[in-house]
Amino acid sequence: MNNSPVGIFDSGIGGLTVVKEIIKILPNESIIYLGDTARVPYGTRDYTTIKKFADELVTFMLNKRVKAIVVACNTMSAVALSGIIKSSGKIPVIDVIKPTVEFSLNQKGVNTLGVIGTRATVNSGVYQTQIKKKNKAKSVFVKVCPLFVPLVEEGLIDNKATQIIAKNYLSYFNDKNLDLLILGCTHYPLLKKVIEKSFRRKIILIDSASPTAIEIKNILEKNNLIRNLKSKPTIKLYVTDAPDRLSETADLIFNGKLPVKLEKVRI
Ligand code: DGL
């Protein structure tokens, strides 16, 4: 099992922000990524629909014989995690929310946190519950930003329209005195600059990528699943639609060049 790939999935290309960090800290691991770009966004859909989609992505990964699954999507982590764990059997499953909450609460001098995410993630209450469970004294403010995912998938990263929408959504936090903002969606790191500019003062921005990469490393080590071959690992990046259209935005995540081309796959 050690030399099998790690399976990573998201509703679209946002989960590649997590892939990038995993490659950075686990450069000897083989990876299979699947972005369900034919059906993105998930965050505006019913929980039953999201759970059904998640189940299909897990089946794809199990057929690829992955040794661990990383749910590189806050929306699926928020509403479909228990089903994903159940379907995955003995294979370890890592979600993005738990490590991101822990990482955020470990930052110094943070009393007031903000969380932005898709409608499904924010309305699930998972972030609020997990933060309060770990530290009752923290104040948490949440805001749904439903247009951010389509803007990223369209490649409208630092565009005038994106700036206006970001300012509009994030003005909710103007009187909240935030110390830290969790980017509770794996697409949002692409909008980091625009988000930063929408705040009047400097705050800490935390996204899911690095905490999740550290978590998968720990889990692989704990389960003796680290790849032990000296040969070059393989990286496969699949999407369910429009690989060519999305490749430019995907390139941006990797500072200009994806490690391999996006391939279209049917699930
Ligand atoms: N990257 C997904 C997330 O982290 C986007 C969800 C969506 O498709 O709306 O939530």
Image (spheres, rainbow, N blue to C red):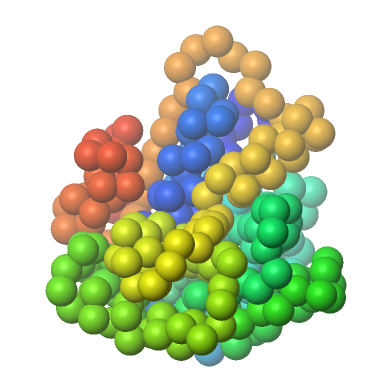
- Tell me what residue is drawn at x 51 percent, y 75 percent: 116
- Tell me what residue is drawn at x 79 percent, y 48 percent: 90
The count of marks equals 0
- Tell me what residue is drawn at x 23 percent, y 63 percent: 157
- Tell me what residue is drawn at x 53 percent, y 59 percent: 204
Q: Is residue 90 left or right of residue 33?
A: right
Q: Position of residue 242 (x, y in %)?
A: 22, 60
Q: Answer whether residue 85 is visible to the viewer in this image.
A: yes
> On screen, 170 above or below 212?
below
* Front position in the image: 182 or 231: 182
Q: Answer whether residue 80 is visible to the viewer in this image.
A: no
* Front position in the image: 76 or 196: 196
Q: Quadrant of residue 246?
A: bottom left
Q: Position of residue 145 (x, y in %)?
A: 42, 81
Q: Position of residue 16 (x, y in %)?
A: 41, 49
Q: Position of residue 143 (x, y in %)?
A: 51, 84
> On screen, 209 above or below 105?
above
Q: Is residue 65 left or right of residue 39?
A: right
Q: Quadrant of the N terminus?
A: top right
> On screen, 103 above or below 185?
above
Q: Is residue 232 left or right of residue 155?
A: right
